[in-house]
Image (cartoon, rainbow, N blue to C red):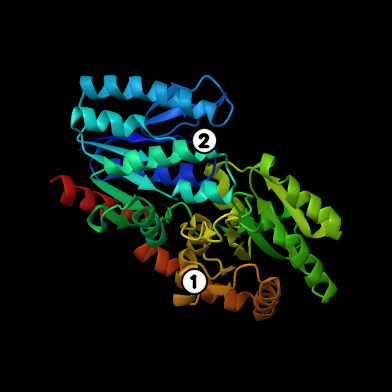
Amino acid sequence: MLIYMITHNDLSVSEGPVTHFTEIAQNFNALGHKATAFAPDLSVGRRPWPLEVHYLPSLVRRRGISQLFYELSLLVALWKACRRRPPDLIYSRQSYISLAAPFVAARLGIPLVTEVNGVFTDDLAGRNAGVLRRWINRVSEGYAYARSQLIIGVSQRVCDVAAELYGVPEEKLLALENGVNTEKFQPQPEAVRTDLRGRLGLAPEHVCIGYVGCFTPFDGVEQLPSVARRLADDGVENFRFVLIGEEKKKGEVERLIDLEGVSEYFTLTGRIEYAELQEHLSVFDIGIAPYRLRQHDDMGNATYIGNSSLKCLEYSAMGLPVVSTYLPQSAYIEASNCGILCPPEDEDMLVEAIKTLIGQGEAAWGNMGERGRELVVEQRSWRSVANRTIEAIEAVIG
């Protein structure tokens, strides 16, 4: 199949949405299909990808307005591409504004698959976004869902919300969680680990508790300075937190680190290129993902709880024990006994979970890590996700 794949994300950035999009595209190609990507040109430098990418101008960098300009660029480019060489399928990753792909697909009679990583109407309500922005988004989501032959949600929760808010019929919905690149993310040579730990200022006796990802309220990273303070006050001194994530999003965490007086226990690396990420994860002894619930101010409903965690899968693929919270995306951790789960936003339990793992030592970490890696290799690789995606597409479009 020739598949035109649409994203609104900056492909030069190392973050979950980009990983998801590019891994699926590359695995489509590996399965014998031809994936061609369309993406906004938002950065000075472009990362090399082993797939064809059409970069389209967004002209304006301001969030929201840039998406409108990108949609116009995409409308023209996608229309021309489909007329010149009609694809078998358009695969669109839903964004706040996603009108071009469903419009072109409907007008030219091309099957459309929409990938949904979170229902943005639900998300924007939690952010107290403006009425106009929420109205535009609701129109966009409804338009895309109505014109899609298949909607792939990153979790069952996402599918349920799409059905509830937009009346999407069950037969059009498929829950398919994130995968992980198990060839890239695997235990690294000890020499790599030792060298990088030294460069990060970690002594051999330090238990490294590592985090990788965004610094959004949902991710819960701002809980960690207080956790560190409590660990130190309880006499636990041999731990260090290493936080990997975007420079522009870590300011609040740095403020809280200073407020708690725990700077000696933290190293914030800033952004690490995806190509080097597995080496940096190798310095971790424990991977942490302290997700929290965020409440709608005007609806009273918990939001974001349907996301599918890339970071937890990457930790497990690296053979690390995982500390996370009781959310749908973390259920495999308890099922495979490869870590410890805590209630969301329960700092007492988070502190106790870390203390428990530190006390159990390397042998227990190794056993948990082996069980976690075995599970993700067998069930959660990106190749298996791509395979199931193609099977579902073929069942719908023939």
Q: Of label 2 and label 1, which has the lower sequence position?
A: 2
Nearer to the camera, 391 or 123: 123
Nearer to the camera, 29 or 55: 55
Label 1 neighbourhood size at 10 Å, few (<14), some (14-19), many (20+)?
Answer: many
Where does the image place residue 316, in percent across and percent down from the top left?
Answer: 50, 64
Where does the image place residue 328, in percent across and percent down from the top left?
Answer: 46, 66
Residue position for label 1:
333
Callout 2–callout 1 Cβ contact below 8 Å: no
Does residue 225 appear in this view?
yes
Which amino acid is tagged 2? Leu
**Would you say 204 lies left or right of 140 here?**
right
Where does the image place residue 31, in percent across and percent down from the top left?
Answer: 25, 46
**The N terminus - image quarter:** top left
Q: Is residue 121 above or below residue 356?
A: above
- Give me the disc on residue 132: 2
- Give me the disc on residue 189: none
Q: Secondary structure at mark 2?
A: helix
Number of labels in the image equals 2
Does residue 336 appear in this view?
no
- The single residue placed furthest to the left in the displayed view is 398
Q: Is residue 207 above or below residue 105?
A: below
Nearer to the camera, 62 or 385: 62
